[in-house]
Image (cartoon, rainbow, N blue to C red):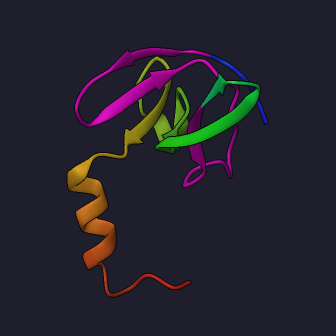
Amino acid sequence: MSTGSITSCSNDNFDFTADISGGNSGGPLYVTEYLNGNTYNTVVGITVAEPGHNGVNIGSNYAVRLNAETLKFFIGNSNKEY
């Protein structure tokens, strides 16, 4: 696990500073919140790429944001396995 910050956010994606490396794609990006002595980890995105991955010049770590559109895609995807 690595900690960092979300540096930019749009309706579809996040840029973030937590360290990632090859093999992290598909892993969760989550925020940690503390409330009344309890710790809550909420998944907010899916890690996609790191800077320079496969020649892509994205400049920062990148994740797809979990929003209504991506959740509908997941729920309707007949290829998922549990």
**Image quarter in which the C terminus is found:** bottom right
* Membership of 17 in magenta stretch: yes
The structure residue drawn at horizontal position 25% and vertical position 77%, both measured from the top left corner, is 76
The structure residue drawn at horizontal position 28% and vertical position 55%, both measured from the top left corner, is 70
Question: What range of the chain is rendered magenta?
Answer: 5-31
Q: Whole-percent x and y of residue 25?
A: 57, 50
Q: Whole-percent x and y of residue 20?
A: 68, 34
Q: Whole-percent x and y of residue 22?
A: 68, 45
Is 40 rendered above or below residue 71? above
Q: Quadrant of residue 32?
A: top right
Is 29 rendered above or below residue 57? below
Is 63 rendered above or below residue 70? above
Left or right of 6 in this view: 4:
right
Left or right of 1 in this view: 11:
left
Q: Nearer the viewer, residue 57 or 71?
A: 71
Is 47 rendered above or below residue 31? below
**Image quarter in which the N terminus is found:** top right
The structure residue drawn at horizontal position 45% and vertical position 37%, both measured from the top left corner, is 63
The structure residue drawn at horizontal position 72% and vertical position 33%, both measured from the top left corner, is 39
